[in-house]
Amino acid sequence: MSTKLSQQPGPIGVFDSGYGGLTILSKIKDAMPQYDYVYIGDNARAPYGPRSFEVVYDFTLQAVKKLFEMGCHLVILACNTASAKALRSIQMNDLPNIDANRRVLGVIRPTVESIGGLTATGHVGVLATPGTIKSESYPLEINKLFPNVEVTGEACSMWATLVENNEIDNEGTAYFIKKNLDSLIAKDSQIDTIILGCTHYPILLPLIKQLVPDDIQVVAQGEYVAESLKDYLKRHPEVDAKCTKHGRTLYYTTEAKDVFKESATRFLDEDIDVHRIVLD
Ligand code: DGL
């Protein structure tokens, strides 16, 4: 594949199973408006949460290759499930064969790095997809940096599906949010910080905030990921030089473009141009 890939600078690629990565992209764009971005949402095959390691890896690699073909030298997996299940294999096994100078980064590490400064009790809850919880990525990564922090996970099997289907603020959604919050807090009553470990969940934040006890802070990842990326590009001028800067963003979805546009516009608060793409 390397012979086909352009060595000219290109946009930063941002990938998610669906709409969730938009919560990351919007914070990245706030922090770094001068860069160009290409977003791919694999809405036709979302949610990824219940899928096996092999399938999430295959789908994520397809998206990464597509973003490379579109000229990206740097791709952000704006999806915890893909970061947990595919990032390491892609970095270690695929990038050396595709192009060792291209970079793929995830969202779990930058989120985890912020945790030490956020919890006072040292008890942290993580709400995420079944896949991310099963991978144990959050406890493993947090305890590498903060061995004394107690991490409790809760798999929220319905939440990403509710977001993908635009069921954002109704009674049924509130039922599932309350059920998972109650279950998490019942497992550890000392939790003072809850990480939204799925990029879809900030879209549910107004409802989550209504239902969570006042003494627990709820942390979304977007700003941490954006700050970490900004810092990464400062520390890696050779990667930064491969990123074009005209302030443009292109949006691609594997589903119908009108459906994506209608939902995405609600989350992004801006009018966007959407194209359909096939991943294979
Ligand atoms: N937004 C994704 C995440 O951060 C995945 C949601 C899903 O497709 O299940 O985990």
Image: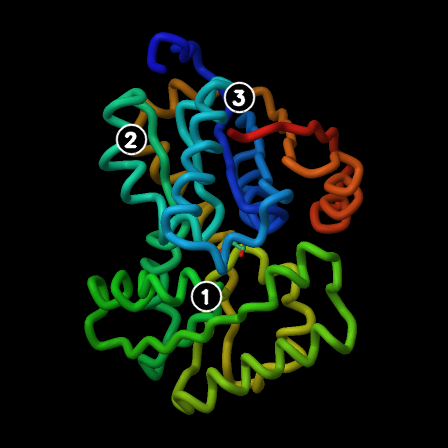
Crowd rating for badge 2 (residues with CA inside 10 Å; few <14, some 14–19, many 20+): some
Tell me the residue that label 3 is attached to.
245
Query: Residue 40: x percent and y percent?
Result: 57, 35
- How far apart marks 1 and 3 lie (CA) works out to 37 Å
- In contact (CB < 8 Å): disc 2 and disc 1: no
Return the residue nearer the eye: 213 or 104: 104
Tell me the residue that label 1 is attached to.
130
- How far apart marks 2 and 1 lie (CA) works out to 25 Å
Give the mark nearer the N terminus: 1 vs 3: 1
Query: Residue 159: x percent and y percent?
Result: 60, 66
Under circle 3, the secondary element is loop
Residue 277: quarter of image: top right
Three-letter residue code for mark 2: Asp
- Mark 1: is the Cβ under 8 angstroms from ligand 1? no
| Vertical position of residue 127 compared to residue 98: above or below | below
Return the residue nearer the eye: 120 or 100: 100
Residue at 40 percent of width and 23 percent of height: 73
Tell whether 189 sits left or right of 17.
left
Residue at 33 percent of width and 75 percent of height: 151
Query: Residue 83: x percent and y percent?
Result: 39, 49
Return the residue nearer the eye: 259 or 197: 259
Three-letter residue code for mark 3: Lys
